């Protein structure tokens, strides 16, 4: 083992640079490996763009958001967009990726990403590529791990948003709706909603009945609570309805872009309650900025453990967290899909006990 490569793929989040730093420093210090950084995710492996990483190049990046290597969520090597004179065609360029890795004489590839990235990593591993994955996403929806780095920072940002909405909601006696990320998982909405004292929390795992949300708001009014804070995940949907799609990005790994459900719900609530309603979409604010101390530490631990797996030649695995312990998880398990919030999750039970409405009960 002499040379390893590392890439960041998919959406960015806080903590990526902490992982890059940990992998590079430990690989160089403890094992004497050479480290190559692949630029812009799998796109860099297709176009053969890379840079050497050493102690100097990763110095001072621990506190930085984003990724010094760049990233993209539109470069799935198994469905890579190739422009022709007439249109965009999608081709399987995985063979080219494997060829370029061999040209670089890479002994192992470290992939940092969410379920899409890790699924691609699994497919490459089945074709003989030595891969070790590191779970990254603000959505916290990667299978095989209790938590992903980037999630804690996103929850901090969302919770601060709720705190700020409380004052204006109470001052104006309004319904304030905060829409957060999460795709088809409600982890951010659940954690931030509970931390920020949300009166209504709507997550994808529990389809909501607008009528029950309205009754909850009116009941609060009867008890002298003249404002309501609603925290809604972008993938939440009404009972018997569909998710709100913002747009379709055909050449992306996840082509459906969710967003705007807070606008739809806001119009319904204002009409049905007669209460002035405002909505805020946090969007990419949850991805950016300096990582929280927890994400810096978690990213460092995951990156360090990934290098250990490489040294032990445990390829085809992802580094995960189970019951506060770092574990190795087969990429085949990770590739099975995303991780949703269990309906019997203790935090849901706690929130219900405090009177929080999830739109499914009186």
Image: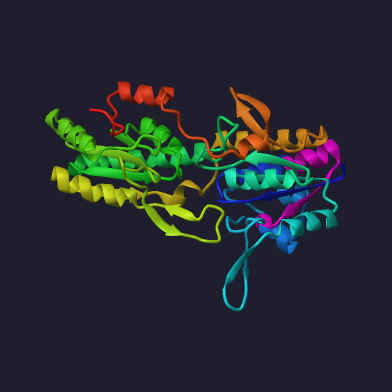
As drawn, 75 above or below 148: below
Q: Position of residue 121 (x, y in %)?
A: 68, 45
As drawn, 332 above or below 48: above
The quadrant holding residue 82 is bottom right
Residue occupying the point 41% across, 25% down = 347
In this picture, residue 359 sits left or right of residue 132: left
Which residue of the protein is positioned furthest toward the bottom in this rendering?
85
- Quadrant assignment for the N terminus: top right
Residue occupying the point 71% across, 61% down = 46
Which residue of the protein is positioned furthest toward the front in this rendering?
240
In this picture, residue 137 sits left or right of residue 46: left
What colouring does the structure picture have?
A: rainbow
Q: How many numbered markers are drawn?
A: 0
* Magenta span contains residue 11: no
Q: Position of residue 343 (x, y in %)?
A: 41, 27
| Span colored in magenta | 23-42
Residue occupying the point 64% across, 32% down = 320
Residue 31 appears anywhere in the view: yes
Q: Nearer the viewer, residue 300 or 41?
A: 41
Q: Position of residue 203 (x, y in %)?
A: 38, 37
Q: Nearer the viewer, residue 29 or 301?
A: 301
* Magenta span contains residue 36: yes
In this picture, residue 149 sits left or right of residue 108: left
Residue 59 appears anywhere in the view: no
- Quadrant assignment for the C terminus: top left
Q: Position of residue 191 (x, y in %)?
A: 42, 32
């Amino acid at each position: 083992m002499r040379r390893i490569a590392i890439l960041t793929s998919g959406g960015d989040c806080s903590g990526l640079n902490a992982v890059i730093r940990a992998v590079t420093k430990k690989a160089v210090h403890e094992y004497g490996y050479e480290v190559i950084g692949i630029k812009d995710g799998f796109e860099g492996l297709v176009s053969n763009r890379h840079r050497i990483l050493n102690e100097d190049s990763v110095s001072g990046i621990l506190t930085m958001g984003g990724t010094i290597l760049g990233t993209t969520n539109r470069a799935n090597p198994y469905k890579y967009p190739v422009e022709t004179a007439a249109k965009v065609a999608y081709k399987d360029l995985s063979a080219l990726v494997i060829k370029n890795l061999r040209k670089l004489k890479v002994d192992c590839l470290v992939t940092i990403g969410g379920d899409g990235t890790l699924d691609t990593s699994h497919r490459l591993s089945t074709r003989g590529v030595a891969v070790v994955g590191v779970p990254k996403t603000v959505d916290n929806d990667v299978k095989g791990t209790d938590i992903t780095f980037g999630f804690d920072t996103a929850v901090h940002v969302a919770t601060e948003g709720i705190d700020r909405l409380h004052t204006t909601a109470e001052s104006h006696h309004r319904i304030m709706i905060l829409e957060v990320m999460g795709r088809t998982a409600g982890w951010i909405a659940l954690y931030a909603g509970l931390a920020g004292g949300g009166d209504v929390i709507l997550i994808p795992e529990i389809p909501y009945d607008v009528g029950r949300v309205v009754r909850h708001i009116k009941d609060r009014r009867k008890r002298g609570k003249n404002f309501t804070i609603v925290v809604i995940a972008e993938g939440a949907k009404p009972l018997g309805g569909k998710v709100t799609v913002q747009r379709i990005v055909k050449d992306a790994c996840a082509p459906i872009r969710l967003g705007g459900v807070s606008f739809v719900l806001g119009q319904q609530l204002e009409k049905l309650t007669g209460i002035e309603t405002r909505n805020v979409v946090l969007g990419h604010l949850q991805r950016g900025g300096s990582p929280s101390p927890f994400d810096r530490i978690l990213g460092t631990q995951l990156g360090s453990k990934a290098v250990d797996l490489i040294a032990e030649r445990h390829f085809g695995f992802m580094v995960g967290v189970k019951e506060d312990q770092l574990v190795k998880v087969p990429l085949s398990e990770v590739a099975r899909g995303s991780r949703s919030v269990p309906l019997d999750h203790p935090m849901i039970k706690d929130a219900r006990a405090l009177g929080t409405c999830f739109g499914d009960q009186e």
